Image (cartoon, rainbow, N blue to C red):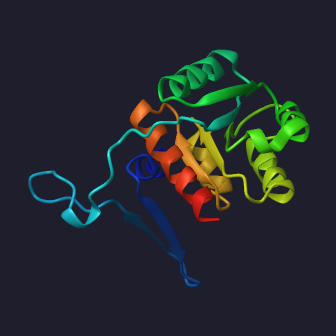
């Protein structure tokens, strides 16, 4: 779980191949860098932060302290937020007025409905709405996989948060 956590936090991935006659191969993919440690020129990114002006995020987090941190971080980036403590509460918010939300940002491990179950239900009901999952438990993510959702590992920085939200906004704009 620590290896997959490291790979994902480094914007990389791991592939596992098992042979019929025994033996397993783990292939770790990490971003390319130059000898001086700078990112390769072909992978130059846009500025790290993006303004969230006009973007409303439904934050779903069962730990109120972590939820408040996420809300404050998103507020600093200019996003407006609504906090739901459980998946069912999030679905109720979406049911009231889905059009006001641009992104759902949900913890994976929650009592009752998990973040992954919530994400799948949101995708079924509102396929245009991007979902970003977050977890501090690398083993949970390794077992469950991403299932096509953006993934942000806890603890995350404001820059990481901004980057993954920029990606989700870009995805939504292309739909």
Drawn side of residue 57 relative to residue 86, left or right: left
Q: How many marks?
A: 0
- Which residue is at the far left? 36
In the displayed structure, would residue 66 be above or below residue 133? above
What residue sits 49% from the left and 31% below the top? 155
- Which residue is at the far front? 54
State the residue in front, 21 or 57: 57
State the residue in front, 119 or 25: 119
Indicate the quadrant where residue 18 lies: bottom right
Quick check: can you spot residue 1?
no
Indicate the quadrant where residue 59 lies: top right
Can you say which quadrant of the picture contains the C terminus?
A: bottom right
Residue 33, percent from left and from top = 21, 59
What residue sits 61% from the left and 38% below the top? 55
In the displayed structure, would residue 94 be above or below residue 69? below
What residue sits 42% from the left and 53% below the top? 7
What residue sits 66% from the left and 35% below the top? 56
Residue 111, percent from left and from top = 82, 31
Quick check: can you spot residue 17?
yes
């Amino acid at each position: 779980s620590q290896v997959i956590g490291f790979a994902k936090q480094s914007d990389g991935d791991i592939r596992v191949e098992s042979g019929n006659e025994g033996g397993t191969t783990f292939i770790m993919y990490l971003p390319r860098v130059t000898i001086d440690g700078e990112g390769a020129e072909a992978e130059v990114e846009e500025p790290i932060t993006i303004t969230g002006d006009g973007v409303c995020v439904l934050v779903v987090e069962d730990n109120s302290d972590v939820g408040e941190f996420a809300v404050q971080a998103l507020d600093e980036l200019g996003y407006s937020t609504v906090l739901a403590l459980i998946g069912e509460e999030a679905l109720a918010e979406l049911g009231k007025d889905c059009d006001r939300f641009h992104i759902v940002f949900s913890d994976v491990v929650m009592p009752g409905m998990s973040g992954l179950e919530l994400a799948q239900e949101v995708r079924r009901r509102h396929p245009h709405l991007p979902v970003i999952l977050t977890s501090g438990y690398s083993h949970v993510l390794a077992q469950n996989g991403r299932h096509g959702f953006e993934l942000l590992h806890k603890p995350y920085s404001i820059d990481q948060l901004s980057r993954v939200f920029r990606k989700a906004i870009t995805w939504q704009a292309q739909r």
